[in-house]
Image (cartoon, coloured by chain):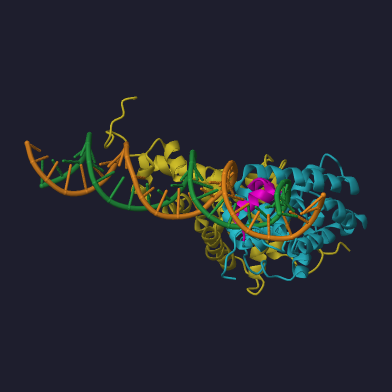
Chain colours: A yellow, B cyan, C green, D orange
Amino acid sequence: MTARRTGRRPGRPDTRAAILAAARVAFAERGFDAASIRAIATAAGVDPALVHHYFGSKEELFRATVAIPIDPAELLPAVLAAGPDEAGERLVRTFLSVWDSPAGGAAVALLRSAVSNEWTARLVREFLITQVLRRILEHLDLDPAELPLRGALVGSQLIGLAMMRYVIRLEPVASAAPETLVAALAPTIQRYLTGPLTAAPPPKG
Amino acid sequence: MTARRTGRRPGRPDTRAAILAAARVAFAERGFDAASIRAIATAAGVDPALVHHYFGSKEELFRATVAIPIDPAELLPAVLAAGPDEAGERLVRTFLSVWDSPAGGAAVALLRSAVSNEWTARLVREFLITQVLRRILEHLDLDPAELPLRGALVGSQLIGLAMMRYVIRLEPVASAAPETLVAALAPTIQRYLTGPLTAAPPPKG
DNA sequence: CGTTGAGTTCAACGGCTGATGACTTTCGGA
DNA sequence: TCCGAAAGTCATCAGCCGTTGAACTCAACG
C-alpha cells in the first residue's frame, strides 16, 4: 500500500466510474465553479491528470456527470397520461421521487451550477424548454398561447421547492415527508396547469 | 485621462461609493465566490488594494454591499396590516417591487451567493427566520404549529419566482409585467398563508 | 515652512486552479 | 514472445485569486 508504484494499476477498470461518482457528489455539493478537479480526483483516489485522461476537460466531466440519469421522455408520459385532472399531484410526486433518489444529485448539481455559471444556466433553460415544457404541450390539451406562462409558473414552484429542500435546506421543507409536500403543492401545480391565471381562485358561491 | 499620476488624487472622496456600486453589480451577477476583488476594483477604476483599505476583506465588502437596503421591518407591516385576506396579493406585489428596484440587486447577490457558499446560505436562512417568518407570525393570527411549514411554502414559491425571473431568466416570467405575476401567484401565496394544506382545493360541488 | 495622515499605487507573497506532455507500467492480442 | 495501446503518475505551466506591506502624493493644519 505505502509502496507507490507508477504506471498502470493491475486490476481495476472501474476507475472511470469512481471518478464519475466523486464528481457527482462534488458538483452537487459545491456547484460547477467551486468544485475542483483536484478535489474530485482525491476523493476518487486518483491522480488529477487521470480525470483529463478520461474526460478531456472539466466541462465535459460535468456534462457526463449530469446528462445521464434523468430522462423526461420516460417519466413525463406516465405523469400526464391519466389526464389533466391528476397531473398536478402526479407531477409533484414524481418530481420529489426523482430528486430524492441518488440520481437527484445530478439535478442538484445542475441547479447549483446554473446560479453562478452562465453556460450552465443556458443548459438548464434549454433542457426545460425542449425536454420538459414541450412534452407537456404534447400531452395536455392546452391553449398554446398560454403554455409558456403556465410552464414557467410550474417551473418556478418546482425550482423553489428544490431550492428550499436541497440547497438552502430550510426546515421543515428540507426534511418533510414527500406526502406532506405533495398535499401542499399539488393544488398549486394543478392550477398553474389547468386553472385560471388572471383572477382569484374560483368563487365559492 | 491617459496621463496617470500616482499618489493621492485631488478632489474625489466618493471612491468608497464607487467601489460599493461596482461590488453590488459584480456580486449580483456572479455571486460571492465568482466575483473577484480585482474585477470589482477594475470596474470601479481603482487599485485592488484600495478595496482592502476601505473594507478590510472580501467578506466585509460583501456584507456592506448586501446588508443595507432591504428592511422587512418597514415593508412587512404594511403588507400584513390590511388583514389576512389580501396578504397574498400584497406580499407578491411588494416582493416584486423590491426585487425589480435597484435595491433588488443586493437580493439577487444574496440569492446567487447562498447557493455555492455555506456561510452565505446560513445568512439567508437566519434572515428569513428572524426577520421575515417571525414577523409574519406576529402580525397574522395563525396556528403556531403550522407556521413554519406555511412560511417555508411561501418562501419556496417566492424564491422559485426569483430564480426564474432573475437568475435562470426563463421567459415569459423573466419579462412579464408585475401584474401578470401577481395575478398568477397571489392565490398560491394566499392558500399557503391561510388555506388548507392537507387536501385538494375546496371541492366545486 | 514642516509635519501629519488619509488616499492611492505598486510589487509581491503563497495558494489554488485547469490543463499539458513526457514518462512508466501493465494488459491483451497477434 | 513481442508490441501497441491503455492506464496511471509526475512535474510543471500559466493564470487568477485574496491579501499584505511598503512607498508615494498631496491636502490640511500649525
- Give the magenta range: B46-63
Q: Position of residue A31 (x, y in %)?
A: 54, 49
Q: Is residue B39 left or right of residue B73?
A: left
Please tell me which residue is depicted at 74% across the width and 71% down the height of the picture. B177
Image position of B187 with respect to A144: above or below: above
Q: Is residue B36 left or right of residue A193?
A: left
Please tell me which residue is depicted at 86% across the width and 54% down the height of the picture. B76
Q: Position of residue A170 (x, y in %)?
A: 70, 43
Q: Main secondary structure of the magenta part?
A: helix
State which quarter of the image contains the N terminus of chain B. Answer: bottom right
Q: Is residue B129 visible?
A: yes
- Residue most extreme to the bottom: A145
Please tell me which residue is depicted at 56% across the width and 70% down the height of the picture. B2
Q: Is residue A154 visible?
A: no
Q: Position of residue A79 (x, y in %)?
A: 59, 56
Please tell me which residue is depicted at 66% across the width and 49% down the height of the picture. B53
State which quarter of the image contains the C terminus of chain B. Answer: bottom right
Res B173 → quadrant: bottom right
- Residue most extreme to the right: B82
Q: Nearer the viewer, residue D30 or A33?
A: D30
Q: Nearer the viewer, residue B113 or C30?
A: B113
Image position of B61 with respect to B42: above or below: above
Q: Nearer the viewer, residue A190 or A84?
A: A190
